[in-house]
Image (cartoon, rainbow, N blue to C red):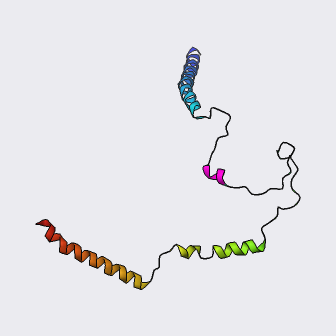
Amino acid sequence: MRGNAMARMAKGRAGAMALLACLPLVAACQSYLPQNDAPLRLSPVLDRIDPGPSNQRLDKNGYPVIGAYPTAATTQVDDATVVETRERHAGAATRGAAPSSAGRYQQSVAELQATAARVRAAGPAQTN
């Protein structure tokens, strides 16, 4: 019986020592927390996203009224704006791409062969 109590006491001491060993780690992590009441920014990308218009009703201080959900959707963009945007972005995928014709390829190969010939011709002259 006495040996069993000693074993429990030793386990309790080991647990207390482990807890004491972790306390400096917890105290060190506190320096990474914000030191003022400024909100913690999790993602700089999310900060730049415009949430768009909302029909949420606000109180006199500008806070949303809880439970006062909008009864209709917000106004959407008109059809002319949609058509203009589609036309503006229609060729976006092909605008940045380089021309990939056989003639351009042959021209590049000829330029590289001419450069290689100049380097070979200039090579022995530079070693003297």
Position in image of residue 81 (x %, y %): 74, 71
Q: Residue at x 65, y 32 (%)?
A: 36
Position in image of residue 48 (x %, y %): 65, 53
Marks counted in the figure total 0
Q: Residue at x 57, y 34 (%)?
A: 32
18 up-or-down from 102: above or below? above
Position in image of residue 31 (x %, y %): 57, 31
The answer to which quarter of the image holds residue 121 is: bottom left
123 up-or-down from 102: above or below? above
In the drawing, does residue 117 fall left or right of residue 108? left
Q: Residue furthest bottom?
A: 103
Q: Quadrant of the N terminus?
A: top right
In the foreground, 80 or 106:
80
Q: Is residue 119 magenta?
A: no
In the drawing, does residue 102 fall left or right of residue 94? left
Q: Quadrant of the C terminus?
A: bottom left
In the drawing, does residue 35 fall left or right of residue 62? left
Q: Residue furthest left?
A: 128
Q: Residue at x 88, y 50 (%)?
A: 68
Q: Is residue 39 magenta?
A: yes
Q: Residue at x 54, y 22 (%)?
A: 17
Position in image of residue 25 (x %, y %): 54, 29
Magenta portion: prevailing SS class: loop
Tell me the magenta residue range: 36-48
The answer to which quarter of the image holds residue 83 is: bottom right
The answer to which quarter of the image holds residue 75 is: bottom right
